[in-house]
């Protein structure tokens, strides 16, 4: 029952590139973890999604990006969420570990969502999350010269930075689709601490990332459901767009594809006409509680010949399933 309301061989250069990104005036690369199967893992990007599946739901995900490139990103994540207070509220937990070269980013966040009935079938969820991530860089391992004989003091030892943060989101859904917006990290934490305010590294900060998501479910007949969706990811300097389509067959098997762009200039998201990647997806609903998903990213950018694709595996288990539930939580 809900309250009513009207209306991301480079060999070991990646570690150095990460350091450069942390010590520059502006950060163009996306700092948030990237997922291809975001549409089945929305707790990872929008705290307002907590409790939206109306059961206790656990999702684990492993992502290995740009296979064949040493130091390329490897990500593991786990989310858990459930409804409480007669489905009027939702709570959740998100934990992740993201490794890029000599840098490790580990985070833990708690989420809370309050749900309001807009109509008999439409619900608006308002969510917040609170937690922290720990960014650790083993700078001593970064090779700056062929014989690694330089003595730059900036590359001594290990650097560690705690980044507490809060996030917020909205998620509007009904039996036909959803639309949502989220900012998982509202606080622009400084990424490096230096003495001397004139050092440009002292101004490197954690950027706010804005996510806009939407999707629909179109039953074609008794066996087939077509589910298009879109995700826009943006910072003040960059934007990326994922266009997706999935076809569910007898509620047990889904095949899908995505096209992703990745551009530095927010003003022209289609300037890279070939895009950044084409993604293939396969989802299997083994039974009413267990789902497994796999995606493969085929790169379209300059890294195409240097790597062997990106693999992502997702596992979900749900404690309970009710056939009477509307179509949207099952596909979204």
Image (cartoon, rainbow, N blue to C red):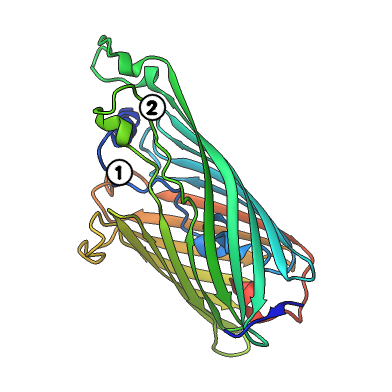
Q: Residue 32: percent from the left, percent from the top?
A: 44, 48
Q: Residues within 10 Å of mark 2 (few under 14, many from 20)?
A: few
Residue sitting farthest toward the front: 197
Q: Which residue is at 26% across, 60% downward?
A: 266
Give the residue displayed 45% in from the left and 47% down from the top: 187
Image location (x, y in percent) of residue 245: 45, 73
225 left or right, relative to 305? right
Determine the residue located farthest toward the bottom in the rendered image: 221
Instruction: From the viewer's side, name the closer residue of 303 and 75.
Output: 75
If the image is split into quadrants, where does the N terminus sit? bottom right
Q: Quadrant of residue 144?
A: top left
Question: What separation in Å lies between label 1 and label 2 (alpha carbons)?
Answer: 16 Å
Residue corresponding to mark 1: 27
Residue 196 appears at what percent x and percent y? 29, 23
Give whichever of discs 1 and 2 has the lower sequence position.
Answer: 1
Give the secondary structure at mark 2: loop
The answer to whether residue 250 of the structure is visible from this angle is no
Q: For residue 193, which numbered disc appears in the image?
A: 2
Callout count: 2
Please identify the quadrant where the C terminus is shown. bottom right
Say if 4 sits above or below 28 in the image: below
* Residue toward you, 282 or 97: 97
* x, y percent for residue 142: 34, 22
Depth check: give the residue in front, 215 or 115: 115
């Amino acid at each position: 029952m809900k309250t009513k309301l009207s209306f991301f061989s480079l060999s070991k250069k990646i570690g150095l590139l990460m350091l450069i990104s942390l010590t520059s005036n502006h950060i163009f690369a996306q700092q948030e973890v990237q997922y291809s199967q975001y549409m089945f893992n929305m707790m990872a990007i929008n705290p307002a999604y907590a409790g939206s599946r109306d059961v206790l739901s656990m999702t684990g995900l492993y992502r290995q990006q740009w296979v064949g490139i040493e130091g390329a990103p490897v990500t593991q994540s786990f989310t858990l969420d459930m409804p409480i207070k007669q489905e009027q509220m939702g709570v959740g937990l998100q934990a992740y570990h993201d490794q890029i070269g000599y840098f490790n980013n580990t985070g833990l966040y708690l989420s809370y969502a309050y749900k309001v009935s807009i109509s008999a079938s439409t619900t608006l969820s308002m969510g917040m999350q609170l937690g922290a991530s720990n960014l650790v860089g083993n700078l001593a391992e970064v090779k700056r010269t062929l014989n690694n004989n330089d003595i730059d003091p900036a590359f001594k030892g290990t650097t560690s930075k705690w980044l507490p943060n809060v996030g917020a989101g909205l998620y509007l859904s009904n039996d036909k689709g959803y639309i949502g917006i989220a900012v998982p990290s509202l606080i622009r934490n400084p990424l490096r601490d230096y003495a001397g305010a004139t050092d440009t590294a002292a101004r490197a900060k954690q950027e706010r990332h804005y996510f806009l998501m939407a999707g629909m479910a179109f039953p074609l007949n008794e066996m087939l459901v077509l589910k298009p969706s879109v995700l826009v990811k943006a910072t003040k300097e960059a934007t990326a767009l994922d266009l997706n389509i999935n076809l569910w067959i007898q509620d047990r098997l889904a095949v899908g594809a995505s096209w992703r762009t990745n551009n530095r200039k927010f003003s022209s998201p289609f300037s890279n006409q070939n895009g950044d990647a084409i993604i293939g997806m396969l989802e299997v609903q083994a039974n009413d509680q267990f789902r497994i998903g796999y995606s493969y990213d085929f790169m379209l950018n300059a890294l195409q010949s240097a790597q062997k694709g990106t693999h992502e595996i997702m596992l979900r288990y749900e404690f309970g399933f009710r056939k009477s539930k509307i179509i949207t939580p099952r596909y979204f």
